[in-house]
Amino acid sequence: MLHVIFGGALWPRAEAGHKNYDSLLKGYAKWEAKHPNGGCIAEGDYPHVVAFDQMVNPPALRRVLVGMLNPNPAKRCTIADVATNRWMKTVECCQVDSYDDPSKTIDASKSKSCFKGSIAKVVHHNHLPTPTHKGHNFIRLPGSTDMDL
């Protein structure tokens, strides 16, 4: 999302010395000073980052992204936090419930709805990660040699 909004990475490495990353650190330092016992990023009360305040709309998306970029990995939002975020739940999913009906096709180039045809409801799917993770599997590609797994 950030690459789309800003046309590339905001900083080459997450370390002090780059103006955009320094802005993130400064925003979090100010916010954490107001919340010494911890706190939740909420509407109107979140770490302000200049580039985000100027370029990322709506503010609900800004709060989600700022939460995902917390400089402290232990306090960073998880994908489950993002998927269950109130605003994120309102984002229309460009996937139909079933591909059995060919009249319901997807057109992601449309701004209001990505569905062609008559769909009476907005489709939201459960994109939460599975409760157990068995790791990443490598597959043999055609023409590749055996891989040690």
Image: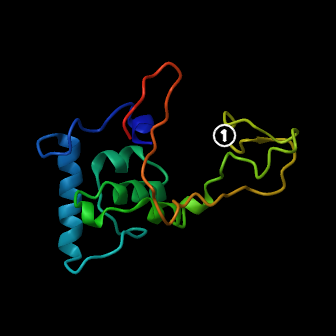
Residue 3: x and y in percent read 40, 36
**Are there few (<14), some (14-19), or many (20+) residues within 10 Å of tag 1?**
few
Task: Using the image, determine if residue 24 lies above or below residue 28.
Answer: above
Q: Position of residue 111 (x, y in %)?
A: 66, 40
Q: How is the image coloured?
A: rainbow
Horizontal placement of 94 versus 50: left or right? right
Instruction: Tell me the quarter of the image containing the N terminus.
Output: top left
Give the vertical position of 33 relative to 55 (above or below). Answer: below
Where does label 1 land, which residue? 111
Image point 88% across, 39% down: which residue?
103
Identify the image quadrant of the C terminus. top left
Horizontally, residue 114 falls left or right of residue 7, namely right
In the picture provided, is 36 more to the left or to the right than 102? left
Foreground residue among 140 and 65: 140
Q: Could you tell me the amino acid type at mark 1?
A: Ser
Residue 119 placed where, x, y %?
Answer: 83, 50
Classify 111 as above or below 40. Answer: above
Image coords of residue 52 (percent x, y): 35, 48
In the image, residue 106 sits, relative to residue 70, either above or below, namely above
Give the number of marks.
1
Q: Residue furthest bottom?
A: 37
Q: Quadrant of residue 39?
A: bottom left
Specify the farthest residue to the top.
143
Q: Please tell me whether mark 1 sits on a helix, a strand or a loop.
A: loop
Nearer to the camera, 99 or 36: 99
Residue found 28% across the figure and 58% down from its top? 70
The quadrant holding residue 25 is bottom left
- The residue shown at (35%, 60%) is 67
- The residue located at (72%, 35%) in the rendering is 107
